[in-house]
Amino acid sequence: MHQLLEKEHQQLIDLLDALDKCISTGNSANKVHEYLSEFVALAEEHFKNEEEIMESCKYTELVAHKKEHADLLEQLF
């Protein structure tokens, strides 16, 4: 797998872990919102990077994959 995508996957997982810990330990809504905002921003950047890599590799299912990304982002809002 592409090194950048692997790094971003790990960052997304780390943010989800931090968010889970934040919620389970009763942190403020502001802190939860901070983690969620960071997660959404990174997810958007990750999807953009992934789509660019897929396009450069002429991935045949790119259109469908872009729709999956859009659907996931819509669920976050």
Image (tube, grey):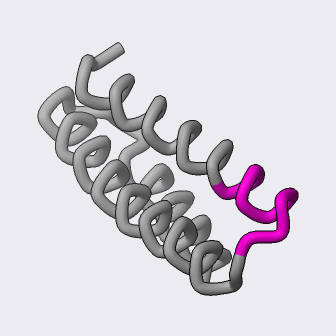
Identify whether 21 is placed above or below 75: above
| Residue 9 screen position, x and y as percent | 46, 34
Q: Is residue 31 left or right of residue 70?
A: right
Q: Is residue 5 left or right of residue 31?
A: left
Residue placed at 31% from the left, 33% from the top?
59
Residue placed at 72% from the left, 60% from the top?
22
Identify whether 61 is placed above or below 66: above
Is most of the magenta stretch helix, strand or loop? helix
Q: Considering depth in this image, is 51 or 59 the residue closer to the camera? A: 51
| Residue 5 screen position, x and y as percent | 33, 30
User: Which part of the image, by quadrant, shows the N terminus?
Assistant: top left
Work out which residue is located at the far left of the displayed protein and give it.
Answer: 56
| Residue 19 screen position, x and y as percent | 67, 57
Work out which residue is located at the far top of the displayed protein and give it.
Answer: 1
Identify whether 13 is placed above or below 70: above
| Residue 37 screen position, x and y as percent | 47, 74
Q: Which residues are magenta?
A: 19-27
Residue placed at 83% from the left, 59% from the top?
25
User: Which part of the image, by quadrant, shows the C terminus?
Assistant: bottom right
Q: Is residue 13 left or right of residue 6?
A: right
Q: Quadrant of residue 63?
A: bottom left
Is 21 magenta? The answer is: yes
